[in-house]
Image (cartoon, coloured by chain):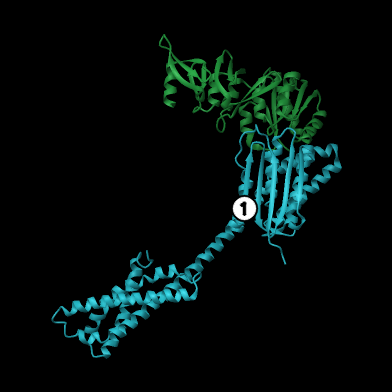
Amino acid sequence: MPEYSSLPLRIAVVDDEPLARSVLCEFLAAEANVEVVAQCANGFEAVKAVSELSPDLLLLDVQMPKLDGFEVLDLVGRDVAVVFTTAYDQYALRAFEVHAVDYLLKPISAERLSEALARVRERLGRGERAASPGAMAAAKPREGHAHRVLVRDGPRVHVIPVDKIDYVQAQDDYVCFRSEGKDYLKEQTLAETETSLDPAKFVRIHRSYLLNLARLVRVDQDERENRVAVLTDGRRLPVSRAGYTRLNSLL
Amino acid sequence: MHPILVRLDRLGGYLALWCVVGVLESSVLTQQGLTWPEALVQVLPPLLVYAFVCLSAWYVCRATPLATSGVPRVLTASMVAAWVGAALWLALNEAWLATLESMPELASITPRFRAQVPFLFVVSVMLYLLVLSVHYVVLAFEAFRTAERQQLELQVLTRDAELRALRAQVDPHFLYNSLNSISALTGSDAPAARRMCLLLAEFLRTTLRVSTQQRISMAEELSLAERFLSIEQVRFGPRLQVERAIDETAMECQVPPLVLQPLLENAVGHGIAGLVDGGTIRLDIARRGDRVLIIVENPRDPDALPRKQGGVGLENVRKRLALVFGGAARLDAAASPSGFRVAIDLPGTVDA
């Protein structure tokens, strides 16, 4: 532990309440080798700060406008360590499932914050970044299914309502969401995407395709006896044998 | 179904009473020269069937309850029912006597009996009226007991709601966040930290005091709500704006405590807190004759995930209004993509 204790930390403080940010900054000012590189009032600002300033640590409130703390972690958790700060203790379990380094309850004490910083330094000193992709996916299916999909595009965040998604395509380490004529890439496996979406609306029609049932017009057979799904916009997607069985059981 | 008919022991007791009546009637007949067996044989069978006819008094009672039907109506209904009942007895009696006369060995006793029929007819009318009044008494007693039980249930529910309101009122997260704000202000602005401590203390004290009262003035309810808003304004800063339209004549009205503050709590928590740039809560209090109208409107993020309508706080207010006023108070909640509006319309009594 001692060898990491002086590791310099660049920190972004994220909270929609100015006073909550100011008390954290006050405590951090008393810490050695700590620099507050950004103060963000919402999740979009936090994602932007991570992209542009690449801090080592986010002190992240859970309940915020637009994007909540967990959504921010989902978007940037691979690039930065996260310590949650909140008045609610009910998120603690989920916070550790998504590999948050620590979980601070408001009102926050300076001592408790110091402990959290020590944990962050220890983890970073061992060369670990925050969350592993598998752990993030494991925590994803919580109560109900996703209403929207968040995709990070550098400093920007796209919010895609699930009913605007036509289909999802696997592409190497990424999945591609097709929505309103545009493609959005997200670092995720198709299996992870599948578990986060409502299985009554999205069907795995092929190893590489997850289809929004509302977009399906009919299933055709091509000249080589392969089945093909025809979408409302005329696009044709391959349907595997297993995918066809799944489709039939839903229709 | 008549309550006597659903239980054998009640029916047994009832018929036993009628047997006593039959014995009394027979004793009158023995004065006229009939022997006891002769009198009993003639009186009892039609009388026991008549006992069932008299149970119809129950339906008469229920069709013309004392509480809501006027005296003339009750008297008319009773008399008509008694005469119809007695006429049925007469028919039963005739049928029985005809049966007896058809048997030669008994034929000799019936003529003496026939002479007593007018007397017995009058007795039957009286008996029907007696049964009817007993029914009225029993029904009144039961109504009284039901009312008493409902009163008790209401008391229990009210107490329960008060406790729940109290718990909902002092939302621990509201406290934690406020304390965190105080902690922040202590370092940067000590006088503001002190003001916040005092606000919070006053808010808690007032909440605890009014939550044990049945009614408080609208002015008191409003001042509690204003303290809540002041505390939240310290937390949210310029993001939280409030516009008020307060009718001063509504201030003297007596209302149940803690109906306004939960609405504002929702407006802040589910509305303003979800908006990056915050917004303006509109609070309207008006008086229309003997009614008080409270309207709370707030903007909300149209992209936010759909929430359950209003949540626990609103449901609590709705239940308490129903408990206190029955159907005389209304709570309407309307959600649009960009806002939420709750309107309460309740009777506001004014102390003389």
Q: Is residue B27 above or below residue A2?
A: below
Foreground: A9 or A188? A188
Considering only vertical position in the picture, is B58 above or below A201? below
Q: Colour of chain B?
A: cyan
Q: Amino acid at mark 1?
A: Arg
Residue positioned 58% across, 19% down in the render:
A178
Q: Would you place residue B175 above or below residue B73 in this image?
A: above
- Chain letter of disc 1? B
Query: Measured from the top left, where is residue A73 in percent x and y?
Result: 66, 25
- Image quadrant of residue A34? top right
Task: Look at 80% across and 31% down and name the residue there.
Answer: A27
Which residue is farthest left? B104
> Can you tell which quarter of the image residue B100 is in?
bottom left
Which residue ends up furthest to the top in the rendered image?
Answer: A224
Q: Quadrant of the C terminus of chain A?
A: top left
* Residue receiving disc 1: B330
Q: Residue at x 37, y 68 (%)?
A: B4
Residue B64 at x, y = what percent? 45, 70
Is residue A116 rendered to the left or right of residue B44?
Answer: right
Q: Is residue B170 visible?
A: no
Is residue B199 toward the left or the right of residue B122 in the image? right
Spot the green chain and give its letter: A
Residue B257, position as x, y percentages in the image? 68, 55
Please tell me which residue lies in front, B202 or A42: A42
User: Residue B176: x, y in percent?
Assistant: 72, 41
| Residue A224 appears anywhere in the view | yes
